[in-house]
Amino acid sequence: MLVVFEGIDGSGKDTQLQLLRTSLSFEYFKYPTSNYAILRDYLNKKISLSKKASFLLFLSDIANEQEKLQRAVENAELVFVDRYVYSTIAYELGDFGYEKSKMLVNEIGFIKPDLVILLDIKSELAQKRKAMQKEPDRYESDGGYLEEVRQKFLRQAKENFHAKKWVVIDASLSPSDVNKAIMEKLKGFNKK
């Protein structure tokens, strides 16, 4: 089963994946990968990229690992992905716009997950969480932008875009309560 974890920065994806490691065995993928150092430099404000270039580079990073991801899905019972094409659409629309960005994702033919778990949190709380961890990156420092990104995630969830199923979990709850909710969704999900 392929499960993608999404949410704005500060929603608790890393925390939840660490908690899940204590009770589940799974293959793990995280995007952006270390193969695309240019993306890290972009996020850390070391370089500038056009909106189109950043969108295409983020998608390219994911596309580059599709064969590896497909093998993992075929050989492992459970594969978790921290960020996927949905983040690229939510954060990096570029000049393409929402509908065209979705069309590009569909045209490229990215693997469709069985389940997308959206950890939803208001941008103000997410910013407070991130500020306690590290220097904010290009996106984490702009609360208004983070809220726009959050709304794009919620829209994708409502549309059940490019996945068998989306679930939205309130990430403002305690980490243990969020973990319980995730475990319930995983146990209740029947891969068809």
Image (cartoon, rainbow, N blue to C red):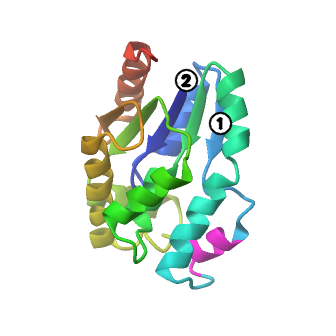
**Of pointers 1 and 2, the one earlier in the residue sequence:** 2
Quadrant in the picture for residue 157: top left
Of helix, strand and loop, which mostly describes the magenta segment?
Answer: helix
Regarding residue 146, the answer to whether it shows in the image is: no
Gap between marks 1 and 2, in whole Å?
Answer: 12 Å
User: In this rendering, is residue 72 above or below 87?
Assistant: above
The residue tagged 1 is 28
Magenta residues, start to end: 38-45
Check the picture and name the quadrant holding the C terminus. top left
The residue tagged 2 is 1
Quadrant in the picture for residue 124: bottom left
**Magenta stretch: residue 31 in it?**
no
**Magenta stretch: residue 39 in it?**
yes
Amino acid type of disc 1? Tyr
State the residue at coordinates (40%, 28%): 176
Percent of width and height locating residue 130: 44, 59
- Using the image as rendered, state which of residue 137 and residue 106 is in the foreground: 106
Dot 2: within a 10 Å radius of its alpha carbon, few (fewer than 14), some, or many (20 or more) residues? many
State the residue at coordinates (65%, 75%): 41
